Amino acid sequence: MPPAFDHAFTRTAAVLVVAALVGALALVLRQPLIVGFIGAGILVGPVGLDWVSGGEEFALLAELGIAVLLFLVGLKLDPKLVRSTGAVALATGLGQVFLTAILGFGLALALGFTWLPAAYLALALTFSSTIIVVKLLSDKRELEDLHGRIAVGVLIVQDIVVVVALIAVASLGGAGAAVEGSVASSMLGTALRAVAFVGAVLFVMRFVMPSLLGRLAKSRELLLLASITWAVGLAAAGKSLGFSGEVGAFLAGFTLAGTPYREAIASRLVSLRDFLLLFFFLKLGAELELGQAAELLWPAAVLSVFVLIGHPVIVLLIMGAMGYRARTGFLAGLTMAQISEFSLILVALGAEVGHVDSGVVGLVTAVALVTIALSTYLILNSGALYQRLAPHLALFERKHLTRAEAADSQSDAVPHTVVFGLGRHGQGVVLSLQQEGRRVLGVDIDPDAIRWAKENRVDVLFGDAGEPEIASSLPIEHIQWVISAIPHVEESLALVHGLRAAGYRGQIAATARGHRDAALLEKAGVNLVLSPHLVAADRLLERMRASAGAGAN
């Protein structure tokens, strides 16, 4: 290691430079950054440049990254969203988890692993990557397609299962406890602590969070800080009670999932999550023991083929049995053809408590690299793949399709119109649209406006029109109109650019305070310019003329 790298700050800066360069190469190769970051960890680790010895200096940042990741997973579990995924997501998700785990366990035993490492391998092979799948489907504009909605629903089910698995691993503790036969008492104690912990969290969720968030939301910076504090605080509480920190972070996110501030918090934390997870993947790559690479080649190849082929086939079988077309089942199944970042977290936790050795961690990491890399190309070219394989997929399809498949149309829950800005003008627009029977979603950053929306039973989202990320939180494929009732033309222009960049092709209306604002909005491509002040002035002049004419008579 160069003498200049004796300083931790200099060493970290150099590692970040390597991560950025390798990440850029991954993008050129159309690969997710996870692949690049693990590769960068190998490069700067003991088997490479030896800038990071074992990755221990990144441990705290890596742990914070995992906590933020689980917090965001919990944050996305809006009860309404969970219900809307329907029976197909639940049946496909649970069926895929069960069948993959059973087959994976048998395959691991056949490869010579004992039952405990085989169980970890089976679970690790079960989960698919939410981050990668959602990103790729979003880039392809397929999140709102039927197969995209089902895939997201299945991933939600998988995320819930992986949290349960993390709780089980943490509660079992070290391998010695299992040998001594104290598992039952350990599980009982953990269950009692879990009931008390979850009860306290639900109490805070029900009676404290709604009013507290309303006050904190007056400052966006304070809302973000409070959210991170809540996530890290519950993660620490979970660890002190004998759970993993991930469980506490997940519960922290779930307590905020039903609030209108969910999307605003999530959009601000995504970048922080990605940055902190960089250190987890760097640490993982730095800790890989490539001396075992020759021994891992055969099992890694076998398990990778199982994931790449087995996941899609299992999903296709389940969805076909439920009455979905082969195309829908194939496209949804293809999104599952990789293992998840949670798979890496699970085996890392297993190694930490002594259930598995570094060889299992290295094997799962190798499978993750192979399946993530190859499945990216499969998902990006899913349409062409289906065209080639369509003649052979008919046997997976029932003659009578489900109602959802036959219709393949948007859900009634999708809003027809989104109104940004719930001031006096925006409130009037919303109420008028509701009277016409249109389903409306309001968006505002003012807590008072959020309260008004709730009182008037208007679906509402806490968000800032000026933020580019706001468009990604909307079902833009099915929205017919976006109306900006915001009086500031700069924010409306930022909203227009954000919507168009996100691929929105519907109609946009925006409010102008004068002729200059109207000209700017029209130039930006707004379909309808609303000028309430000019209209009011024209009506005033008309009434003045009418009054003057009546007086003259």
Image (spheres, rainbow, N blue to C red):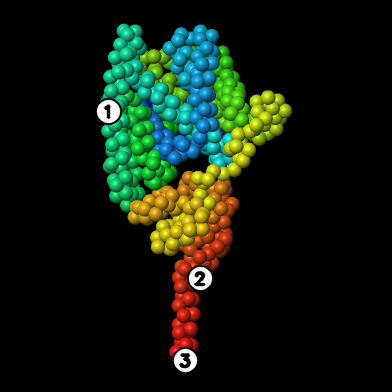
Q: CA distance from mark 1 to mark 2?
A: 61 Å
For badge 1, the amino acid type reads Ala
Mark 3 Cα-neighbour bin, 10 Å: few <14, some 14–19, many ≥20: few
Residue that label 1 marks: 196
Mark 2 Cα-neighbour bin, 10 Å: few <14, some 14–19, many ≥20: few
The image shows residue 452, relative to residue 147, as above or below, that is below
For marks 3 and 1, the one nearer the N-term is 1
For marks 1 and 2, the one nearer the N-term is 1
Q: Residue at x 30, y 26 (%)?
A: 194
Where disc 1 sits, the SS reads: helix
Q: Residue at x 54, y 34 (%)?
A: 150
Q: Say whether marks 1 and 2 touch (CB < 8 Å).
A: no
Q: What is the x, y in percent for residue 171? A: 33, 19
Residue that label 3 marks: 552
The answer to which image quadrant residue 256 occupies is top left
Extreme-right residue of the structure: 391
The answer to which image quadrant residue 399 occupies is top right
Q: Residue at x 58, y 40 (%)?
A: 145
Please indicate whether residue 389 sits to the left or right of residue 364 in the image: right
Q: CA distance from mark 2 to mark 3?
A: 33 Å
Q: What is the x, y in percent for residue 251? A: 35, 33
Q: Nearer the viewer, residue 211 or 178?
A: 211
Q: What is the x, y in percent for residue 362? A: 47, 18
For badge 3, the amino acid type reads Ala
- Residue mark closest to the camera, 3 vs 1: 3
Mark 1 Cα-neighbour bin, 10 Å: few <14, some 14–19, many ≥20: few
Residue that label 2 marks: 515
Where disc 3 sits, the SS reads: helix
